[in-house]
Image (cartoon, rainbow, N blue to C red):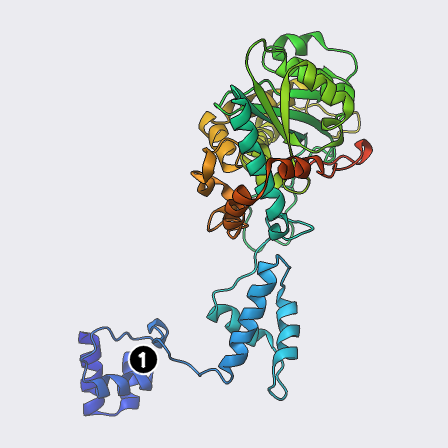
């Protein structure tokens, strides 16, 4: 403030221009300080530090057009349609009645800023909007609730196949700002992967991961090191068929003399084949098959387990690339990680998965919730901020209206996913973001 007072006093004795030159500020600053009488203590020497007052700036020429544009965008996003900046500009030109309206980049930036809109990378890609699956989701939840009440299961299991890629080099890296190129060393084996069947129980117990290995002949050292923690299948394949599904059920699930068990898994072909059903009956295991297209809402592995599981594997991969001992080909290229390395990734990642996450995953997918709708609010996709918030009312209505026969028919009409040679599970995409 003392600086300002001296500048104003100098301006009074000489001129505003002279004072501005001597004190190194603009004429407008001197004039403003004289007009305000230096009462505004918050006044600063620079105009750039002033905050814009609410309502300041040029008013909108067509507020109704602005409102209609915002409603159109919200409608498209509610239907899960992709809305890009270019699409907004094209639509704005169509909807505007103003002559020579250009929908410029400047207009677009202002529009997005006014309505708190931004561009985001999609987190989920789907062929249908989530609301189209609400009937299947409600039918599945009510069906599982009814068979649980009828059979009083001792244990409920969930399982799912997931691919573990041996090269996670698509993750981000830290580098200097402004870098035009961001090269990252990789193994050159982006498509190489193994398939792991993860299985866990509603009380948090984690079964041994069932791993499909790329070798036919067992390796004694691998069996000795990992045989206690992993079920190793030396099949030289990366997808399940009836034979492997049978082997998985017998080795991981096994027989139980007295316990009643329910297995929840997806509608992959080998899960619903006649041979697999026969094996399930011999092991006295009931099943509830998640309807096709709804695994991202109802399958515990897809919704809860896989992110933590694959994040740990990616962390192990990055540590291996930084500090691990690597082998090279004769041409000097990196070889893919040896079997003992990536099996350790699988073992450690599954071991680190918290038991409370397993327990929550069953309730979050509507599998072990209290009957009668008391815990419907725990189903993740039906929460107010979930993908299908309106589905909660539909679930309540389904619980009242659907007969047991209708629910059984709905579950029997589940569309089988795809043939064996087309298999690509919902979770076979490596988590790299």
Q: Residue at x 51, y 64 (%)?
A: 117
Numbered marks: total: 1
Kindly indicate the quadrant of the structure image that contains residue 284. Answer: top right
Nearest to the observer: residue 284 or residue 199 = 284
Kindly indicate the quadrant of the structure image that contains residue 188. Answer: top right
Placement of 376 over or under 238, stated as above or below: below
The answer to whether residue 394 shows anywhere in this view is yes
* Position of the C terminus by quadrant: top right
Placement of 372 over or under 99, stated as above or below: above
The answer to whether residue 312 shows anywhere in this view is no
Q: Residue at x 73, y 28 (%)?
A: 272
Q: Residue at x 51, y 20 (%)?
A: 205
Give residue 311's position: percent from left, percent from top. Answer: 56, 34
Nearest to the observer: residue 413 or residue 83 = 413
Placement of 73 over or under 107, stated as above or below: above
Give residue 241's position: percent from left, percent from top. Answer: 77, 24
Give the left or right position of residue 49, taking residue 250 as reference: left
What residue is disc 1 on?
25
Kindly indicate the quadrant of the structure image that contains residue 271. Answer: top right
Give the left or right position of residue 375, taking residue 347 as reference: left
Q: Residue at x 52, y 72 (%)?
A: 111
Nearest to the observer: residue 169 or residue 288 = 288
Mark 1 residue crowding within 10 angstroms, few (<14) / some (14–19) / many (20+) = some
Secondary structure category for the residue under label 1: loop
* Position of the N terminus by quadrant: bottom left
Give residue 232's position: percent from left, percent from top. Answer: 68, 15
Give residue 185's position: percent from left, percent from top. Answer: 66, 37
């Amino acid at each position: 403030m003392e600086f300002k007072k001296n500048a104003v006093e100098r301006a009074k004795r000489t001129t505003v221009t002279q004072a501005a030159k001597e004190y190194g500020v603009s004429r407008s600053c001197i004039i403003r300080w004289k007009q305000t009488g230096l009462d505004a203590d918050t006044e600063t020497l620079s105009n750039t530090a002033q905050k814009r007052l609410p309502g300041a700036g040029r008013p909108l020429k067509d507020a109704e057009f602005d409102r209609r544009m915002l409603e159109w965008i919200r409608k498209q996003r509610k239907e899960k349609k992709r809305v890009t900046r270019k699409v907004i500009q094209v639509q704005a030109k169509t909807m505007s009645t103003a002559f020579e309206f250009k929908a410029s980049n400047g207009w677009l930036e202002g529009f997005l800023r006014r309505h708190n809109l931004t561009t985001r990378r999609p987190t989920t890609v789907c062929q249908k909007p989530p609301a189209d699956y609400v009937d299947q989701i409600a039918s599945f939840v009510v069906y599982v609730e009814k068979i649980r009440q009828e059979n009083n299961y001792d244990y409920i299991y969930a399982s799912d196949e997931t691919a573990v890629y041996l090269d996670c080099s698509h993750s981000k890296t830290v580098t200097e700002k402004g870098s035009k190129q961001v090269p990252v060393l990789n193994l050159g084996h982006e498509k190489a992967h193994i398939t792991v069947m993860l299985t866990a129980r509603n009380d948090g117990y984690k079964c041994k991961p069932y791993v499909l290995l790329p070798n036919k002949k067992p390796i004694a050292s691998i069996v000795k090191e990992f045989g206690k923690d992993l079920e190793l299948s030396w099949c030289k394949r990366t997808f399940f068929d009836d034979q492997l599904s049978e082997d998985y059920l017998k080795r991981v699930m096994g027989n139980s003399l007295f316990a009643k068990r329910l297995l929840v898994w997806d509608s992959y072909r080998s899960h619903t084949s006649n041979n697999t059903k026969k094996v399930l009956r011999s092991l006295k295991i009931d099943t509830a098959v998640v309807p096709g297209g709804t695994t991202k809402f109802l399958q515990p592995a897809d919704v809860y387990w896989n992110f933590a599981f694959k994040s740990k594997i990616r962390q192990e991969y990055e540590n291996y690339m930084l500090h691990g001992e690597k082998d090279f080909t004769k041409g000097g290229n990196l070889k893919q990680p040896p079997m003992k390395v990536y099996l350790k990734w699988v073992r450690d990642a599954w071991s680190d998965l918290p038991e409370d996450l397993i327990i929550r995953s069953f309730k979050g997918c509507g599998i072990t919730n209290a009957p009668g709708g008391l815990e419907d609010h725990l189903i993740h996709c039906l929460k107010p901020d979930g993908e299908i918030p309106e589905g909660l009312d539909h679930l309540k209505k389904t619980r009242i209206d659907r007969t047991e026969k209708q629910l059984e028919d709905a579950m029997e009409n589940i569309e089988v996913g795809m043939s064996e040679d087309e298999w690509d599970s919902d979770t076979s995409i490596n988590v790299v973001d």
